[in-house]
Image (tube, rainbow, N blue to C red):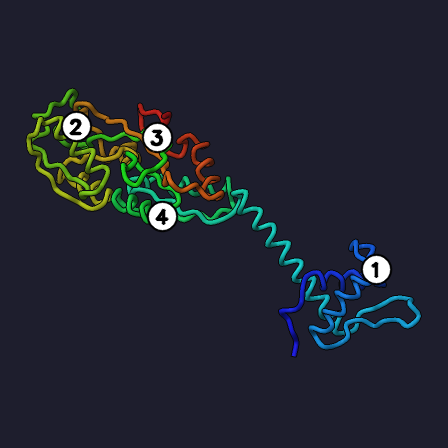
Amino acid sequence: MYHLDAVTLKQLRALAAVDRHGSMAAAGAALGLTPPAVHSQLKALEQAFGLALLHRSSDASGSSLTEEGRVLLEAHVRIDTALSQAAQEIRALSEGLAGRVTLGVVSTGKYFAPRLVKILHTLIPNIELVLRVGNRDQVIRDLENRAVDLAIMGRPPRQPLVEASALGVHPHGLIAPPDHPLAGRQALSAADLLGETLISREPGSGTRILMTRYLDRLGDGQVFRLVEMGSNETIKQSVMAGLGLAFLSLHTVTEELRHGQLVMLAAPQLPILRHWFLVHRAEYPLRPAAKSVAEAVLGLKGTYLPAVDGVSHDV
């Protein structure tokens, strides 16, 4: 029976040194050990396997490995290689050059998040970046549950406590189909909008919260007719079909505005300029890999954000 739990790296290194240098004396000199110490390591190794691992010369001309010793030496080489690779991987993890990071993004951010992830893969290729998309409430829950390391969102939450860094300007406005009666008119008033149907995101959406505040301020408490839909894509298609107007992040409609499928209305106090933020839990220090991702995102200074005419990326 072999006693593998008694085998140590020191013993294996002593075996490799004897093979390399040809004698226990020379092996001891290379390892900084006395010949008796090397002999003791090899004796313990042979006892663990219950057989001879060395051919010992009677005339002190040296020692050579038995066939069994050769097999064990090959195993030692594989172990040494695996440990060296592990050391490199551990160093990369500790220095933030490798690892797995989960990035939460509110659903409005899905229009630029894939581009950002592609850029990050180029900048820090050894870090696996997982994208997790949800509405504002879901992203906040993910932060609370530590299901994400970092999150990109609009207004940072009050709870949980987070550290937030501004990434770039996030504009919001009212959009309409190009043939709408209000399209192209200047200086629209609250009265112009009161008779319109407004298509809205679901409760819990950051866009819905901002829209509600805007309409309350604009209409001084008057009630607007709302139709609720659960995704930006459905809202955009509904507006293009003439079902109503919509208050949306302009980062979600850049292509439609560029190609004339939608237009932005000149409504009062619009566009509203908010900011995108990169946030993480304040009470937990970022792991090295997450810190590297955060530094890379901040270093890009919002250049991955969709371009909106007349709106700068700058914070």
Inter-mark Cα distance, 4 to 3: 32 Å
- Binning the other alpha carbons within 10 Å of mark 2 as few (below 14), some (14 to 19) or many (20 upward) gives some
Q: Earlier in the sequence, mark 1 or mark 2?
A: 1
Look at discs 4 and 3 and give the one toward the viewer.
4
Q: Nearer the viewer, residue 293 or 60?
A: 60
- Secondary structure at badge 1 equals helix
Inter-mark Cα distance, 2 to 4: 45 Å
Residue at image position (18%, 43%) is 203
Inter-mark Cα distance, 3 to 1: 68 Å
Is residue 284 visible in the rendered structure shown here?
Answer: yes
- In the rendered structure, are the residues bearing label 3 and label 1 in contact, judged by CB atoms less than 8 Å apart? no
- Binning the other alpha carbons within 10 Å of mark 3 as few (below 14), some (14 to 19) or many (20 upward) gives some
Three-letter amino acid code at disc 1?
Answer: His
Q: Residue tagged by mark 4?
A: 146
Three-letter amino acid code at disc 3?
Answer: Ala
Inter-mark Cα distance, 4 to 1: 54 Å
Three-letter amino acid code at disc 2?
Answer: Ala
Say which mark, if any, is on residue 183. 2
Q: Earlier in the sequence, mark 4 or mark 3?
A: 4
Position of the C terminus, as image quadrant, is: top left
Name above or below for residue 290 compared with residue 179. below
Q: Residue tagged by mark 3?
A: 307
Position of the N terminus, as image quadrant, is: bottom right
